[in-house]
Amino acid sequence: MRTEISVDRTWEARRRAPFAHNRQVRDGRTVRVRVAEPLRFLLSVANRGGDVTVPVDGVSSLVHIVESLGVPRTEIGELRVDGDAIEVLPVRRPQRYPDPRFVLDVHLGTLARRMRLLGLDTAYRNDAADAELVAQAAAEERILLTQDRGLLRRRALPAGGYVRGSRPDDQLRDVLDRFDPPLAPWTRCPACNGRLAPVPKREVEHLLEPGTRRSYDEFSRCPACGRPYWRGAHAKRLHAIVIAAKRRGDQDHA
Ligand SMILES: [Zn+2]
């Protein structure tokens, strides 16, 4: 018999039954797990072919079996069960959340700044412990982004994502492609995530280098940390990122 198990990603569903998609499998047997190509990079090198036979202990759920192979539950979109075979499909993109907010682990500082530049509510501290990240994600309903698979397996974590790519540009593209969050460039402080407010030039003039003072007239300031901002060096590149992201979004919705 063939069963399809969809993983409901809404916050409410997670609160009600975070493991509703779990099923247990019978003891004393093996299951064949077939992992879809986009998830195979998460498997150990020996299993990268994507077909793995796993002994079943009678206690583990399907999700735990798949996680034990290296694929965190946050990356599993659907488990298709056909007899003793399990097909593991990735999260369908875009995976949209209403008004999404994020928290990033300590290794993703550059990505955090870029997400903030695009106006995404992005919590980040370079000294946050793993347990603190999970607690913050749960308390503030933030999606935890990381490249640490162990972190994504934490039971207390309501939502998360494994960030693809080693360069910040690739990572940002992956996040935009996966979550398709609404963007509001130039509205957040890249340093502290505060919401920027426009200010008259005269209020920040004393904080500026002479070159900046001469070249720009529109400024904003972060009420949280006091830093002044203007559309300077990053503007062109950021604009290109936004345009690329929007173009992709338009194709999706066409
Ligand atoms: Zn700030």
Image: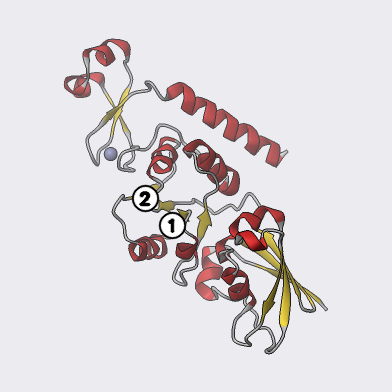
* Image quadrant, ligand 1: top left
Pointer 1 or 2: first along the chain: 2
- Residue, disc 1: 142
Spot occupied by residue 34 in the image (x, y as percentages of width and height): 73, 66
The secondary structure type at the circle numbered 2 is strand
Q: Which mark is residue 39?
A: none
Callout 1–callout 2 Cβ contact below 8 Å: yes
Residue at point 63%, 49% (across, down): 94
State the image quarter where residue 251 is shown: top right
Quadrant housing the N terminus: bottom right
Spot occupied by residue 11 in the image (x, y as percentages of width and height): 51, 64
Q: Which amino acid lies under the numbered mark 2 shown in the image of this protein?
A: Ala
The secondary structure type at the circle numbered 1 is loop
* Disc 1 CB within 8 Å of nearest ligand 1 atom: no
- Residue, disc 2: 123
Q: Most extreme residue toward the left, as rendered?
A: 206
Within 10 Å of the Cα at label 1, are there few (<14), some (14-19), or many (20+) other Cα atoms?
Answer: many
Query: Can residue 181 be seen by looking at this rendering?
Result: no
74 in relation to 244, above or below: below
